[in-house]
Amino acid sequence: MQNQRNERVLPIAKSSPFHFRQRFLSIANQLRYGLIFLVLLSLLPTGGLLIYLSFQAQIQQSRSLQEERSQTAGGQIDNYLDDLKRKLSYLARVKGLTNFKPQAQQSLLEGLTRHNDAYEAVAILNRKGQVVASVSPYQPLKLENPANSPLFIRAFKQQEDYVSPVEINPQTHEPNTILAVPIRNERDEVDGVLLAQVNLNFLWFVVSQTEVGKTGYVYVVDERNFVIAQKDSKPETFQLQDISKRPFFPFLKVSGNTKRLNVYRGLKQVEVLGASALVRSVNWKVVVELPTAEAYAPVYQMLSIMGGSLAVVTIVAVGIGFVFIRQIVVPLEHLTAAATELSAGQLDTRVNIDSQNELGTLAIAFNNMATQLEELITEVEVERNFVSAILEIAGALVVVLDPQGQIVRFNRACEQTTHYSFSEVKGRYIWDLFPNSDLAGQAKTAFESLQSGNFPQEYEGSWVSKDRQLKLIAWSDTALLDDRGEIEYIIKTGIDITQRKQAEEELKASEQRLSFLFRQSALAVVEWDLNFKVTAWNPAAEQIFGYTAAEAIGHHAAELIVPASAREVVDRVLSELLIDTTGRYSVNENITKDGKTIICEWFNTPLVGEAGNIVGVASLTLDITERKQAEAALRQAKEEAEVALKTLQQTQAQLIQAEKMSGLGQLVAGVAHEINNPVNFIYGNLSYTAEYTQNLLNLIQLYQQTYPTNAQIQEKIEEFELEFISEDLPKILTSMKVGADRIRQIVLSLRNFSRLDEAEMKPVDIHEGIDSTLMILQNRLKANPDRPAIEIVKEYGDLPMVECYAGQLNQVFMNILANAIDALENYDNQRSLKDIQKNPSRITIRTKLVTNETQRGYCKNVMIQVQDNGSGMTETVRQQIFNPFFTTKPTGKGTGLGLSISYQIVVDKHGGSIECFSQPHQGTEFRIEIPVVQSGAVALAGK
């Protein structure tokens, strides 16, 4: 066999003749010419592509720069306009701005103009388009027919913000625009327009600050396609330009936010690279244009340098390629021939290449491979199939590394755990799969330890999966050695223990928490077995019941803490706990170790095992003895306090009202007395004055008849108008007498109402008390600018003298009539004047004598009914009107004591009754009924 192999060694110089075409298409020639072609193909297209990409990058950079410039300028303009519009909108959102006084409107407008000097003039238009207020720090605002202008129509009628087209101010020769927003009245209805004339000088500041190379420029175009601002121009001399007919205008029609412009002839008739940005708030465009001569100059310079460099590199690469290709092609032809024979199954083929480079080494390796290939091919095939089957079906993680730590096998379990596929990790170092530097360092340290001969190793480590999940792996590492005892492969097998570790940690934490709660809880924690013997007894249970854990554990509940009277109930509850898993709550009496009876709250819960069966009972207990005692004491104290409070409130209300009425009565009586004296003096002398006056007039007439006329006297008679005085003076005295009579009646009514001289119960005329009260309230009954007079209808019956406390009963009449007037005034405020005239406010007072058959002897009672035709009241209010301090009036308008005191006066002091009948929109009626003659017990109680 060895001889045959030696005979088949191929000589280097020997070669078979080939056809020209076959030789040209041979691998050697393809390699020879192909390598040179590849050099050219790689350099020229790559260089050209780089040049092209560099050119496009420069163009794109220039365009991006233009776009950024336009967006920056547009954003500055947009922010400035937004600030102006926002301040205007803040003022427009002031509710009721149109209803403010002119001075207030003027102050608000002046504050707006002080905020920004761009506001040349601000004004408020009413709903008719008329200027009602305006402010201008420069010149008055002039508007021609504003009611028909678009700014008023859009802002007022269409209720939207409006920006007028840009115009040149004829006085300042500067461009300006008008902002208009709707304003609202107090009912939140659009009731006018707030507008501001804004100068656009800030546009020149923006365009002048925008740098566009050395020769570039910026301009602003409004929605009408007029240039309204331009760099290198002045606002005072600028003229609006219409560019809608210019050739480059189609490039400026932008539908989105921004658009990159192509190369075109710009505003100054020079080819430019331009970009525009939209000013969203006003639909203007900011256009930035840079002449292409400046934009493309750096690009052309770069192209010339890169082109020359590419030509030089290509020539040098082709020359070097010719030299080195020949050293490769000749040995390759020999290797090709040998490989052809080897592929045909001639495993004894050898090749002899006299070269010291890689091709010579390859030839030696080829010869060795041919020798070993036939022997190993069968063993390798069997071993590969066996190992592959084991790795793929194994449930554990298996990773095979070469001596350098690169992954050569990665089984299916590894793919499922880490979410990496074998193709993703093949050939990578094992520590490269750890994104965390600490984990990567641990993996590398473990691998170096294996290389040092420390194997096998078993440890737990962390591994981060592809989706960043942390996995805990229990590893077992070992090494496979070759025939020389050197490491050929490192085998890592592992088991994912992530879930197991988490469960162990959670169980450990739960046990620690439960142990802490058991020891530190203020609640007694007791566990019982199925025979209700104590299995656990915490310190709180020791403190509550007095038994130590050693004394309690192992004993039945009945032996320790259950009194004899409650054992039957406790046994039933315990039996139910072994059947029902829902638990029980109870409050029981228990016995402590020293025989003391306490009250405890019990929370009993069955303990259910893994199989679903009950294995015991857990109880939480709290000693509530002191709490129960405190609750009972608190309940009793609360009841006593409520009674005392109610009594105090009633007494306080009576004292307040009594003191109030006493002071009022003394005041009224004193005023009546003081008025009565001078009135009596005036009234008593009026008759004498009338008599003396008549005598004097008669005497004057007698003088006129007896003595001849004197010129001087006649002049004085005409000057004094003696004839008129003679007629008018008796009339004046008659009027003075009528007024004095009226004052006397009012004074009498005040004295009758106060009744200070009638503190004892005595027979009085009820009608006189009602009339006195009406006389006092006459001022509130009369008409006023807001409503007509309140009509009083009296339907008095034939009543005898009634035995009562006159002053207190007048107080009742005053409270009821005053409440009726309040109700009618409130009702009239809710109605129109037409409704009031159609159905005027009215108070009807009826009195009659009735027989009360419920009392002994069928005694006679007097009934007084006071009825109004107001809005009435709900049933809820009606049921509470006699309660102390209950009132439906606003704070400061009523105390809620009037009807409560009235109820006590009628019921408690007069033995009568007072009732209220009312329904919503049906008016209100108070019905008072008191005996004509008071019994002795009632009179004594009233006193």
Image (cartoon, grey):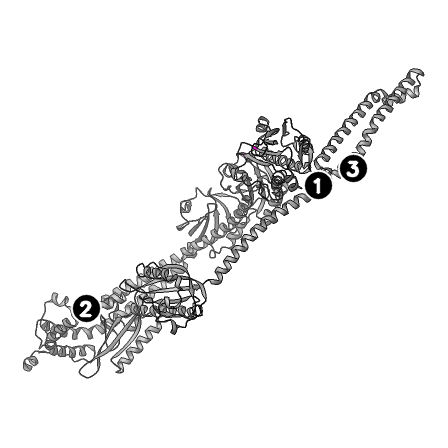
- Judge from the rendering whether residue 742 lies leftward or rightward of residue 892; answer left or right: right
Type of amino acid at the residue the image marks with label 1: Leu
**SS of the residue under disc 3:** helix
- Tag 2 or tag 3, which sits nearer the N-term? 2
Quarter of the picture holding the C terminus: top right
Q: Alpha-carbon distance for marks 1 and 3? A: 15 Å
- In-front residue for pair 48/437: 437
Residue 923 is covered by the magenta coloring: yes
Q: Nearer the viewer, mark 2 or mark 1?
A: 1
Q: Alpha-carbon distance for marks 3 and 2? A: 123 Å
Q: Position of residue 68 (x, y in %)?
A: 44, 55
- Judge from the rendering whether residue 173 lies leftward or rightward of residue 311; answer left or right: right
**SS of the residue under disc 1:** helix
Mark 1 surroundings within 10 Å by alpha-carbon count, few (fewer than 14), some (14 through 19), many (20 or more): few
Q: Is residue 841 visible?
A: no
Q: Position of residue 711 (x, y in %)?
A: 92, 19
Quarter of the picture holding the N terminus: bottom left
Q: Which residue is mark 2?
A: 392
Q: Is residue 201 visible?
A: yes
Q: Is residue 283 above or below residue 724?
A: below
Query: Residue at image x 18%, y 73%?
Result: 329
Q: Which mark is residue 664?
A: 1
- Judge from the rendering whether residue 352 lies leftward or rightward of residue 315; answer left or right: left
Provide the residue span drawn in magenta: 918-924
Q: Are marks 3 and 2 in contact (CB under 8 Å)?
A: no
- In-front residue for pair 912/724: 912
Quarter location, residue 620: bottom left
- In-front residue for pair 70/406: 406
Type of amino acid at the residue the image marks with label 3: Glu
Number of numbered discs? 3
Type of amino acid at the residue the image marks with label 2: Glu
